[in-house]
Amino acid sequence: MLKKSLTTFIILSFLAVSLTLVIPNTAEAAQPVLKWGSVGETVKTLQQTLNSKGYWCGAVDGIFGKKTYNAVIKFQKDAGIKVDGIVGPQTWRALGKNSNTNYTQPSRGTARTLTVVATGYCPCYKCNYPFYGQPSYLGYPLRKGIVAVDPKVIPMGSRLYIPGYGEGIAADQGGAIKGNRIDLCFSTHQEALNWGIKTVTITVYP
């Protein structure tokens, strides 16, 4: 009887250890990883926390742009942790947001479709005169994926899907971009010329 009880105890102990190794820490896994281009309520939480600690990232607008990125970099350097501008579990813990903090990923709501006239541009001097060398309206470097929009039609920071182009973010504006018009940033001037002017039905994610 004693031998049987001892055997049962050993088996149960082995199973308990195995489950501990296999089952991930769900609280920590639920922490959002934020980086340049992230948007939502959790970014606002990050911005509020950084501002309160003296790492100024500007207005709490829920958009992870240049100011938020620079604040994260400075905080990571001062905290002696990995400096990559990405807010993962290590940075959250250093900010005082441990794995027991209840983080929820913001809902993007319902996507909508919109038919627009899409043109192309690139970071070159010709496309950006007299603002050559400056970042997008939200502070992002001009590169493929940056889309200029009319904020009255598409809110800044919105995620977009453009057929024939791919994913993008509404991060720029332009004097000629009014109403149902968008301007897609390409890596080269020739790619922008190849795109030309197209009427496409895009998907806008809030």
Image: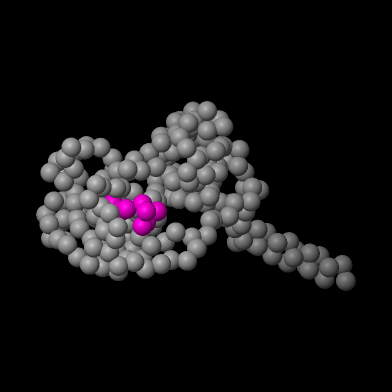
Residue 149 in the magenta stretch? The answer is: yes
Residue at x 65%, y 58% (from the top left corner) = 20
Which of 6 and 180 lies nearest the eye of the viewer? 180
Residue 184's place in the image compared with 76, above or below, is below
Question: In the image, residue 186 lies at what x, y percent?
Answer: 21, 53
- Residue drawn where x is 54% and y is 56% of the image: 105
Residue 49 appears left or right of 131: right
Magenta-colored stretch includes residue 47: no
Q: Position of residue 61 (x, y in %)?
A: 47, 43
Is residue 147 visible in the rendered structure shown here?
A: no
Residue occupying the point 22% across, 50% down:
176
Q: Which residues are magenta?
A: 147-155
Camera-nearest residue between 173 and 187: 173
Relative to 117, residue 189 above or below: above
**Color scheme of the displayed model:** one colour
Residue 31 visible in the displayed image:
yes
Residue in the foreground of this view, choosing between 43 and 128: 128
Q: Position of residue 48 (x, y in %)?
A: 55, 38
Q: Total marks drawn? A: 0
Residue 129 pos. (x, y %): 16, 40
* Residue at point 18%, 37% (across, down): 130
In terms of image quadrants, where is residue 5?
A: bottom right
**Quadrant including the C terminus:** bottom left
Where's the N terminus, which quadrant?
bottom right
Helix, strand or loop: magenta stretch = loop
- Placement of 34 over or under 72, stated as above or below: below
Q: Return the residue found at the far right.
A: 1
